[in-house]
Image (cartoon, helix red, strand yellow):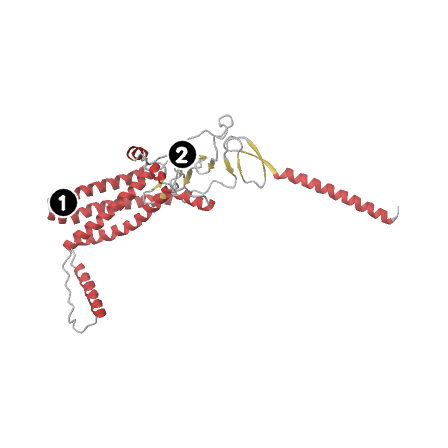
Amino acid sequence: MDSSSSTQFENFVASLVAHASHIQEQFVTEVTENYETTCWGCGLRVLLPSCASAFKCGWCGAITDQNKKKPNLKCIRWRVVRDRCFVSVVLVFMFFVIFGGVWAVYPVVFSVSILCGVFHSIITAILSVATISFFSFAAFRCAGTPPNILWGSYPTVGKSDLENYTYCHYCSKPKSPRAHHCRSCRKCVLDMDHHCPFIGNCVGAANHRSFIAFLISAVLSTIYVSIMSVYSGLRTWPPLKYSLGHINGVSSSELAWRIMNEIVVAFMRSALLLSSRGLILAYLFIASVSLQIGLSVLLWQQLSYIYQGKTYLSHLSSQADSEEEKKDCQNLVTFFSLQYFVTRFLPTFRVTRKKHIK
């Protein structure tokens, strides 16, 4: 065998060896990439590739994310203390507005007439009882507990019993797709909208209507307080004393500036002569107008989400997923449980059984 033929033979053998090693490496890689794990929902074993950190069980439908681990719970106590402080401040403020307003306004109202005083007393009682009651329902009622469901073993869990359920590492139990874990409340909440520190509770399926009713009653109460504060303040405010001086030969712009300046100065001088009742009225007006603006914006946002059939959290997730909004007035009817009223008194308005998407 000459040198050229021996060289070709060696190259052929080398190519065969390289091909065989490549097949062996590919086989080893395919074997080592697969690993066996267990579904938390039904306990069945699943064979997965190593790149799959999250998977859905083909039997029970539970979703497992192996990257999620039980987080650190050391920094949660301060949230509980914060919520309790906020709730205490809100309750003290509401009682201050009620009793301070009655003390400052009603001597003026009853001085007009007894009938006027009784009428405003009834309005004050209704708004006060409604606001405090709905606040208590929203703050101290459970926001919504997810239903208990069997899990953990194959004979117990049936086909698709845990469809799209995930495992909550905080509660160490299944979490439904409509539930979300709140770290401040330290539990899973069904149809969670958000955690409100001012009520010290989550807004969920069980107290969402109470929260909306509290916002409505609070907005109406702040409007009433601002109107009555202005009315009583105008009747008890010290008279304004100002002097424009000589106005002959003064231009119109200079005259307008002088009038505004004199009015502001006279207003500030008279404010120094206010009684304690007048100071309370001024504070009630400023506080009620400020709260009225903020609560109206929050109420409008909540009603718009309900109209879209969403909550605040689902609105954030839908923005990430680019889902289409299903806007419908029936979402409002279903949310406030007005199906009987609508079908009884408005038969032309058709109400279908449509779930409030969370």
Q: Residues within 10 Å of mark 1 (few under 14, many from 20)?
A: some
Is residue 81 shown to the viewer in this render?
no
Where's the N terminus, which quadrant?
Answer: top right
Q: Is residue 353 left or right of residue 103?
A: right
x, y percentage for residue 109?
14, 48
Q: Nearer the viewer, residue 14 or 347?
A: 347
Q: Is residue 338 left or right of residue 19?
A: left
Q: Residue furthest front?
A: 348
x, y percentage for residue 212?
31, 41
Q: Secondary structure at mark 1?
A: helix
Q: Nearer the viewer, residue 94 or 236?
A: 236
Disc 1 to disc 2, C-alpha distance: 48 Å
Identify the residue shown where x is 69% and y is 41%. 25
Q: What residue type is disc 2 on?
A: Pro
Q: What residue type is disc 1 on?
A: Gly
Task: State the mark number for residue 244.
Answer: none
x, y percentage for residue 245?
15, 70
Is residue 13 shown to the viewer in this render?
yes
Q: Residue furthest top?
A: 155
The residue that disc 1 covers is: 117
Q: Nearer the viewer, residue 345 or 214?
A: 345
The residue that disc 2 covers is: 146
Where's the C terminus, which quadrant?
Answer: top left
Q: Residue furthest right?
A: 1
> Quadrant of the rendered structure where residue 355 is?
top left
Q: Secondary structure at mark 2?
A: loop
Q: Nearer the viewer, residue 102 or 73?
A: 102
Looking at the image, tell me whether mark 1 or mark 2 is earlier in sequence order: 1
| Residue mark closest to the camera, 1 vs 2 | 1
